[in-house]
Image (cartoon, rainbow, N blue to C red):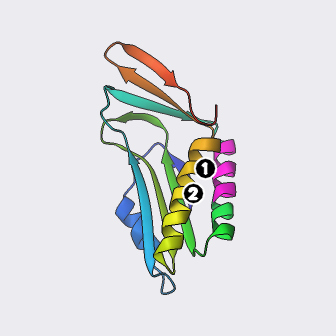
Amino acid sequence: MITITDEDFDPGACIDAARDPRVGGIVTFTGIVRDDGITSIELETYREAALQELGVIRDEALSRYDIRSVDIIHRVGPLAIGDHIVVITVGAPHRRDAFDACEYIIDRIKETVPIWKKEHTAEGSRWVPGEHS
């Protein structure tokens, strides 16, 4: 499953969905809005292009690593401190491929997926240049 949503999600449900008799390890990465001097963030995307690129990244991970499943959910819209931003769930027979694939996926998302972040502070707002800019 690849989803871009403005609704919150349950990372635990993603883990449960990755369970499979062929899977010996499930690795997840959950990105959360952190308090580093901001009051909130806003994420915008070109949804169709982002979904297509997330699909490419999933397919790359499936071909590079011995994994059985990849699920990615990414939020957009206004988010507060502590809100979920992204969850990546990878199921694999062995942990090393699951860890490596999960790291590969989040790195590629930051490099290539058209999602833009605006940070809001007490002093004002600013767009944050992404790695894919």
Label 2 crowd (10 A; few <14 / some 14-19 / many >=20): some
Q: Residue drawn 34% across and 43% down?
A: 83
Q: Residue drawn 43% across and 17% down?
A: 125
- Return the x and y of residue 49 as percentages of the image width and height: 69, 43
On residue 104, the disc is: 2
> To which quarter of the image does residue 27 belong?
bottom left
Q: Is residue 24 above or below residue 4?
A: below
Q: Give whichever of 102, 55 is nearer the camera.
A: 102
- Return the x and y of residue 46 as percentages of the image width and height: 64, 37
- Return the x and y of residue 8 as percentages of the image width and height: 39, 48
On residue 108, the disc is: 1
> What amino acid is found at the position of numbered circle 1 in the picture?
Arg
Q: Is residue 40 above or below residue 124?
A: below
Disc 2 versus disc 1: distance between alpha carbons? 6 Å
Q: Residue drawn 57% across and 76% down?
A: 68
**Highlighted range, magenta:** 48-57
